[in-house]
Image (spheres, helix red, strand yellow):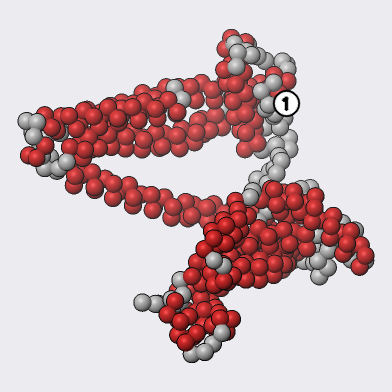
Amino acid sequence: MSVFWILVILVGLAIVGFALGRRRAIGSAGGDPKTLHSRPNYYGVGVALAALIPSLALLAIWLFVQPLYIDAQVATQIADAAIPEGSTRGLMMGDIERLAAGFDQLESRGLMTPEEIAALGPDDDIRGRLGEVGLALGSNVSAETLDAARTFRSLSATGGILMTVAVLLAGAAGFAINLARVHHSKRARNQVESVILALLLAAACIAILTTAGIVLSMLFESINFFRQYPITEFFFGLQWAPNFRGNSDLGIIPLLWGTLYISLIALLVAVPIGLFSAIYLSEYAGRRMRAIAKPLIEVLAGIPTIVYGLFALLVVGPMLRDYFAQPLGLGNSGSSVMTAGLVMGIMLIPFVSSLSDDIISAVPQSMRDGSLGLGATKAETIRQVVVPAALPGIVGAILLAASRAIGETMIVVLGAGAAARLSLNPFEAMTTVTVKIVSQLTGDTNFASPETLVAFALGLTLFVITLGLNVFALFIVRRYREQYD
């Protein structure tokens, strides 16, 4: 049974448990809800939670542990001699999993029967059959790979059956035990609120643990990378020329330069436009204009970045090339730092505008009235009173926009190209850290090579930079923010 139908059954069990728990509570009180310790709904919620929480927890643990167990069992079936030259055990396991998934799809679509799948041999056109369902293998199918895929399917099917039985039994047991304990004197509200509090705490912990897991995963792989490649050459190298055959130059300086150069141009576009539009909306625009203009500006934040990238590739790049780069003799390519920077700046306008508008609007009206009462003009009041009062929040908004610019990928791929170089010419193609992370992890890669592991070192470096900007933004806001009554 699929996970979806297991969840459907558990939800149905919880609904039934809610109804029966509520009815049983009222029945134990002789039909008078006033004699219950808690409201009837609490008894129903208690039964529903007792059916859901143990079963969902078991399901989550099972889904995490079962793939690890199956991979370990299948990996022991592969002898070192069975691994093709130039491949690794990890790559072979990937082919085994894809082969097993392909067999499942062929069977589910009726393209092959279980008997036909069991009769397949290494000499049959297995790769061609997998192509019918859109799957591809990195190497030819050997007898060892075929046997391992069959073992993988068998263990997965057995594990799926056991998981279904165990999860449904856990839900039924929780349902029955809690329903039997429903009584008019039971402190149902206290128990339900304690469970809800524990769930909220677990949700907060999940967010923290997810962040920690991301950092640790990048850190461990980065350590493996630095064991193979000198750390000084990575952080201070001026050449980026990966070569999966060896002798790679993996200096991060050209990538950081392209990242910061494009981000700087983007901020030079976004900050003035965003800040001036925020001042207009909060200080000059009427209610009708504000109600129209602000949503239109915020629409920019909802446009997918791939659309911005296409706009840069098809419109902005050719325009800059034809009207600026070629006449000035600065380049002949539509992909450039200026192209990506301008389009990224347009994307960042709503970030700066909306945050700055909210911050400026929060400045007390009494400060404006006091300045105007002393004879200052509206422009002088905005320049000398409102903006300085809102400046910490505006700086925080700008730093958050900078973090967003540093992490952008699609606009850079389509607008700035993929050339890693150190240059001051804004009409030359360059690239960023995020683009190279994608390129190093694309295709069939060997995760034991420094050319692939460098992606994790790049990711960790980018994470530290953006984290530093976010922490600095929070520090500025909290340190210099004025508290108004």
Three-letter code, disc 1: Asn
Residue 316, quarter of picture: bottom right
Residue 454: horizontal and vertical position, in percent? 67, 54
Residue 415: horizontal and vertical position, in percent? 77, 54
Up-down: is 197 above or below 485?
above
Number of marks in the rendered image: 1
| Whether residue 462 is visible | no
Q: Which residue shows up at 44% across the image and 22% down it?
A: 1
Q: In this view, does 141 lie to the left or right of 4?
A: right
Up-down: is 412 above or below 58?
below
Q: Which residue shows up at 70% across the image and 52% down it?
A: 308
**Disc 1 element:** loop
Q: In this view, does 434 lie to the left or right of 107?
A: right
Q: Is residue 157 left or right of residue 173?
A: right
Q: Which residue shows up at 54% across the image and 66% down it?
A: 286
Q: Which of 442 and 185 is in front in this view?
A: 185
Q: Which residue shows up at 41% across the image and 37% down it?
A: 60
Give the residue at mark 1.
140
